[in-house]
Image (tube, grey):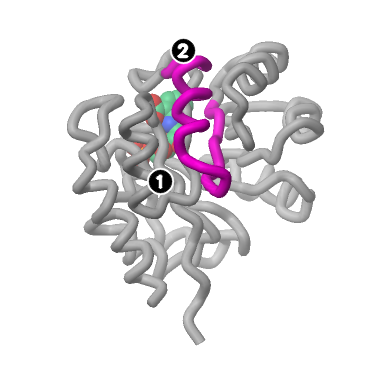
Amino acid sequence: MSDPTPRIKICGTTSIQDAVHAAQAGADALGFIFAPISKRRVSAAVAREAGLGVGPTVARVGVFLDQNLDEVLRLSEAARVSAVQLHGPLSGGFVRAVADFYPVLRVLRPADLAAEGPLWQAVPGVTLMLDAPQPGGGVPLDWDRLQDTFPPGTWLAGGLGPWNVAGAIRVLRPAGVDAVSHLEARPGVKDPAKVADFIAAVRGASA
Ligand SMILES: O=C(O)c1ccccc1NCC(=O)[C@H](O)[C@H](O)COP(=O)(O)O
């Protein structure tokens, strides 16, 4: 029997048009980046409107890096996200505080996996995502090296695109995949064909 298809998150959504297209193409989740350093940063107002445009079954994920708890909760509420993605070095208390309000995707780099992975692996409401050290940088991880330590139920990001995502799925069997750089026409603007090809490649890998 084949493995279930990984969940598909299309990150860096900055417009209603891109949100609707990704949802129609079959995305399970859309990422809205609120990190000030991102070239894909979006306002809570646009994220909220885009989220309202995609129907009841698509998750809306607020993405944060180096932001305090007040800001994470305030922006998440304003944007009406359904989950929160947390990057960067964070205390366990911070992650748990956010998880009291939202399902959390806790993003780790491979170097953090041994120390932090076991902390979150079995915690209800917290899902691990493994990503490259520079989020949104388009650089793939070394999947073969990770094969023995990749925890079951973990999501995968980092340099995924239509041409390589099936290979990543075959090696690591992630519960979800996430991408942005290689799905864009330019930073913050999706290429609809690349988004559709990415989703088709994920589905094809699990067929
Ligand atoms: O993409 C960004 O600009 C970004 C900035 C700050 C924090 C997070 C960011 N992106 C988060 C994502 O979920 C990306 O999809 C993930 O890092 C993979 O990116 P890519 O390697 O470009 O596919």
> Who is closer to the viewer here, 185 or 126?
185
Does residue 154 appear anywhere in the picture? yes
Residue at 71 percent of width and 12 percent of height: 70
Instruction: Find the magenta span and give its range.
Output: 42-63
Note whether 174 is above or below 195 in the view shown: below
- Spatial CA span between label 2 and label 1: 25 Å
Going by the image, does 102 lie left or right of 23?
right
Residue at 62 percent of width and 26 percent of height: 80
Q: Mark 2 points at which residue?
A: 36
> Tag 1's secondary structure?
helix
Counting from the top left corner in percent of width and height, residue 77 is at 66, 21
Counting from the top left corner in percent of width and height, residue 164 is at 27, 58
> Who is closer to the viewer here, 88 or 176?
176
Q: Name the residue under label 1.
A: 23
Whether 75 is among the magenta residues is: no
Residue at 36 percent of width and 22 percent of height: 40
Note whether 183 is above or below 3 in the view shown: above
Q: Are marks 2 and 1 in contact (CB under 8 Å)?
A: no
Counting from the top left corner in percent of width and height, residue 174 is at 51, 61
Going by the image, does 169 lie left or right of 4?
left
> Who is closer to the viewer here, 75 or 94?
75
Going by the image, does 89 lie left or right of 49?
right
Q: Ligand 1 lies in which image quarter?
A: top left
The amino acid marked with disc number 2 is: Pro
Does residue 110 appear anywhere in the picture? no
The amino acid marked with disc number 1 is: Ala
